[in-house]
Amino acid sequence: MQAVKAGDTDWLQGKTWSLQYYIDEEHHEVLKAAHQLYFSENYINPFLFKSILKMEKEVVAMVANMLHGPASAVGTMTSGGTESILLAMYAYREWARKHRPSIKVPEIVAPSTLHPAFDKAAHYFGLVLRKAKVQSTQAADVEAMGKLITKNTILLLASAPSFAHGVLDPIPAIGNLAEKHGLFFHVDACVGGFMLPWVEKLGKQLPAWDFRVPAVTSMSGDLHKFGFGAKGASVVLYRNAQVFEHQIFVNTEYSGGIFATATMLGSRPGGAVAAAWAGLQHLGQEGYLKNAKAMLEATDLLRAGLVALPDIEIIGKPCMNILAFSTKNNKPDIYVIADFMEEKGWVVDRQQLPPSIHLTVFPYNIPVIGQYLADLKSAIAWAKANPSAMTEGNAAMYGLMARIPLRGMVKDNVRKVFLDAYGKGMGNEAPIAEQPSREHKWLGRLNRFLAFTFKR
Ligand SMILES: Cc1ncc(COP(=O)(O)O)c(C=O)c1O
């Protein structure tokens, strides 16, 4: 296994700029020890494992405190941001079924930059998610959101901040919109919930983004991101039990007895709860502040280096240690730059709509920032000297992807990539991607390059 694993991305070297939330070995060992202690416990029944329930409640209370929740705030831990989001969307739908039965298909209004976990929730639960265009800064356009509200709308959404650009939506203004129309309002702080409190404590003024905005009725915040817990830990939190009660699933007819769960999973790992609790205790406010300060200072350094490059522009006004950049008017082509950086060994998160490169700054990226900027400078020079590169290789494919209007074709092909990946090694003789395609000839090639759409 070690030999096989050696072929995976070596993210600790700092060349990866997303996904791997890690501080240092000492903290890692604390998480592992806590996880190990509860390795075997099946937390499907919280009343059987009172110590895990106690930890979960304490974690939820600590998160509620961080996010300025009122005394009535209530919620659960979940297996991650997606589950927190799925559960909140499900609870709102169930609330609407009971209290607004005239609405046959509940609608939700959100800025287009929202995380796809909400699209997944809408897809799973039969909700209509209406996405409003955003401002050129990539922050939500409140007026555009207002125009999408109908008599079937039950909920507004916003990000604090968005994953792609690290841009904070105008939560107070969206709150006003929610109040005006009598709507619920969920703020997704999956990536920012454990950073923005420290950003503010370190002296940066931010518009209110959490339960301080009275219209906010629920939030999601991930322990397995900047909470620095083990994977499989997030919190979904409600202002009060009014909607939360709908999250709890009860079946009284099961032959195995009365069955009830507060979250989506059945059998549930106790270790993830224990590790999250231990991580919070181990770091404490001081630890989080110290790490946040280091990551934010490194982000400032990186931002200054990017701004000093005349061809580069940063997208919007990032509020924490996440940013996205592109080239001015996309000249030279950002995807050509991405290809060059990949050649240099960097793991590049290519984004679309508009084309850009994403960077989240973690502690392990700090030592390589100078190298990144130097390579980027070379990449820009190379892209300028080789304009034809945008019609070749990956750059051509990503460019095409970003512009292609037929998203259905793209969707089908991404699905094929997954089928292929899961089929291989399971006795599937003919990988689907290699089967002759009836579609345009470039679609075959597309399969290999679509990875960026599901990288995160
Ligand atoms: C803003 C935001 N929301 C939701 C999610 C989904 O979280 P998870 O990947 O833990 O399911 C992410 C993940 O990056 C995110 O950044």
Image (spheres, rainbow, N blue to C red):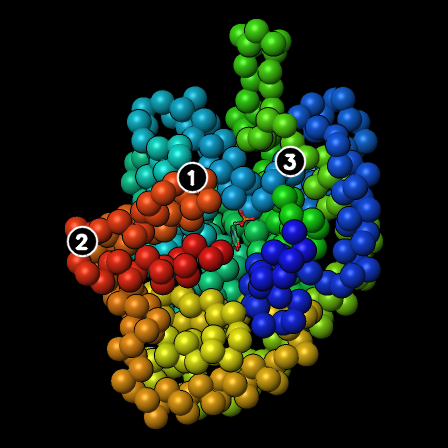
The first of marks 3 and 2 along the sequence is 3
Label 1 residue near ligand 1, CB within 8 Å: no
The picture quadrant where one finds residue 16 is bottom right
Residue labelled with disc 1: 427
Residue labelled with disc 2: 439
Q: CA distance from mark 2 to mark 1?
A: 26 Å
Where residue 145 appears, as percent x and y from the top left, is 35, 52
Q: Badge 3: few (under 14), some or many (20 or more) residues near its Cα, within 10 Å?
A: many
Residue drawn at (47%, 75%), measured in percent from left and top? 342
Q: Is residue 440 visible?
A: yes
Residue drawn at (46%, 37%), measured in percent from left and top? 89
Relative to 297, does residue 422 appear above or below in the rendering? Answer: above
Q: Which amino acid type is shown beneath numbered disc 2?
A: Glu
Relative to 344, does residue 382 appear above or below in the rendering? Answer: below
Q: Which amino acid type is shown beneath numbered disc 3?
A: Thr
Where residue 397 appears, as percent x and y from the top left, is 30, 68
Element marked by disc 3: strand
Q: Which amino acid type is shown beneath numbered disc 1?
A: Gly
Residue drawn at (62%, 66%), measured in percent from left and top? 10
